[in-house]
Amino acid sequence: MGQLSYGSSLSIHLDDRTLAHLQAAIGVKLHNGESFYLSWATDKEGDSGRSSVWIFPSAPLFYTFVDSRWPGLNPKWVEALVRSANTIEGMTVVPEPGLAG
């Protein structure tokens, strides 16, 4: 399980494949100088909830992957993640296009 760290106080744990796609999508937005919310579901002690953080071009982001190999990226998933950043909820982990499930 990989990790996206925001500064020194926040860590979001995600599988490496999802994290790699988020890294690419966040990179697209930041390369364009765009700020946005990153939102994710949380589950603490059986209660489901949601958390968000404001991502901006100088945000202190650090990506840690468990696997040293870079996974093949699905461009349609990266595009879907980028599009989700333009919603009121902000960028969220949407299902990977092309996968049944």
Image: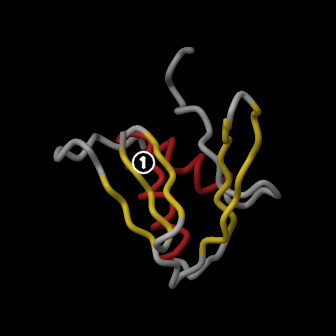
Which residue is rendered at x = 40% and y = 51% of the image? 3
Q: Position of residue 31 (x, y in %)?
A: 48, 77
Which residue is rendered at x = 17% and y = 47% of the image? 68
Which residue, as the protein is rendered here, is positioned at the far right?
88
Where does the N terminus fall, quadrant-wise?
Answer: top left
Q: Nearer the viewer, residue 79 or 7?
A: 7
User: Against 6, is 32 above or below?
Assistant: below
Q: Position of residue 90 (x, y in %)?
A: 72, 58
Which residue, as the protein is rendered here, is positioned at the far top?
101
Which residue, as the protein is rendered here, is positioned at the far left?
68
User: Against 18, is 51 above or below?
Assistant: below
- Name the residue type under label 1: Leu
**Residue matched to label 1:** 19
Q: Which of 12 and 82 is in front in this view?
A: 12
Where does the C terminus fall, quadrant-wise?
Answer: top right
Q: Nearer the viewer, residue 46 or 42?
A: 46
User: Against 9, is 51 above or below?
Assistant: above
The reply, left or right, for residue 2 in relation to residue 93 is left
Label 1 crowd (10 A; few <14 / some 14-19 / many >=20): many
Q: Nearer the viewer, residue 21 or 40?
A: 40
